[in-house]
Image (spheres, rainbow, N blue to C red):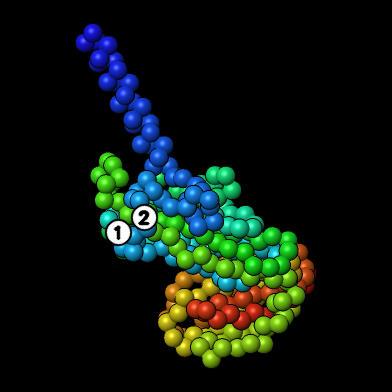
Amino acid sequence: MQRKMTAFLFLFIILASVFVVASSGGKTGRTKLSDTPGCTCHGSSPSANVQVLIEGPDTVKINSTTAYKVRISGGPASAAGTNIAVSQGSLAPVSGTLQSLSGELTHTAPLSFGGNTEVIFEFEYTATASTGQITLAANGNSVNLNGGTSGDEWNFAANKVIQVESPNAITDRINIQPSAFTLNQNYPNPFNPATVIRYRLSTVSAVNLTVYNVLGQRVQTLVDAEQTAGNYQVAFKAGTLPSGTYFYTLRVGAEIVMRRMMLKK
């Protein structure tokens, strides 16, 4: 009898361990786009103590692939997890911290804050072949890693509405030049195989400099960082790319400027 009880207890511990590990691997179907929203395993309702933000461009081109981030802060802040969904198009992880399940993204394991004030999950969105508005949705949890769910908290991100445009829409904004920064024409232009892109910032800003082809598909991200005021120049090397027209976009905060360049081989 004692041996049976010992064997049963051993089996129970194994099954419980498997359940905990499996649960820590993330879940889908928990965003505001789902019929069953909410990370209820970490609390019955969302908590204002946890802040979840979807960060990235508000406008993308058809068939293009664009980088986005989910930032999670607040709560117990030992580790965090997330579930990310989109109404149209597709999502893909850019590192091992996320996995694709049932067309959505979720964490592979709780990601440690590591002494930082926030956890960041990075992913890519590939737009549909038609124009219109799509919605990105996410939730995030902040956990204490105490071996259970007691004391854990979670919250929804505000849904992010993204406009999917045709490639021709690029030309509508080429000559718009905000006063907060200046984007110069690349030189040389036309070029082969490399050119230099110069820009000036008047204040400390979050900067993204990306090159696209005529289909609106992302070719290369040259800069994605916070930079101080000043003059900058970045080399774009196109040795493996075919001849043709390309566009480069400079996003500074909420403002964006695009210019055209020509690769001739």
| Residue at the spot of label 1 | 75
Q: Amino acid at mark 1?
A: Gly
Above or below, 94 relative to 19: below
The residue at the point 53 percent across, 51 percent down is: 35
**Which quadrant would residue 238 be assigned to in this image?**
bottom right
Above or below, 46 relative to 60: above
Residue nearest the viewer, comparing 48 with 127? 48
**Which quadrant would residue 245 be assigned to in this image?**
bottom right
Above or below, 154 relative to 183: above
Q: Residue 148: x and y, percent?
A: 28, 42
Q: Amino acid at mark 2?
A: Ser
Cα distance between the residues tagged 2 and 1:
13 Å
Instruction: Kindly give the residue lying farthest to the bottom in the view shown.
Output: 179
| Residue 239 seen by the camera | no
Residue 26 located left or right of residue 221 = left
Mark 1: secondary structure: loop
Q: Residue 222: x and y, percent?
A: 56, 69
Please report contact status of discs 2 and 1: CB closer than 8 Å, yes or no. Answer: no
Which is nearer the N-term, disc 2 or disc 1? 2
Instruction: Kindly give the residue lying farthest to the left in the view shown.
Output: 2
| Mark toward the viewer: 2 or 1 | 2
The residue at the point 58 percent across, 63 percent down is: 135
Residue 127 located left or right of residue 72 = right
Q: The C terminus appears in which quarter of the rendering? A: bottom right
Residue 10 located left or right of residue 71 = left
| Residue at the spot of label 2 | 45
Q: Residue 108: x and y, percent?
A: 45, 45
Residue nearest the viewer, comparing 158 with 241? 158
The residue at the point 74 percent across, 78 percent down is: 190
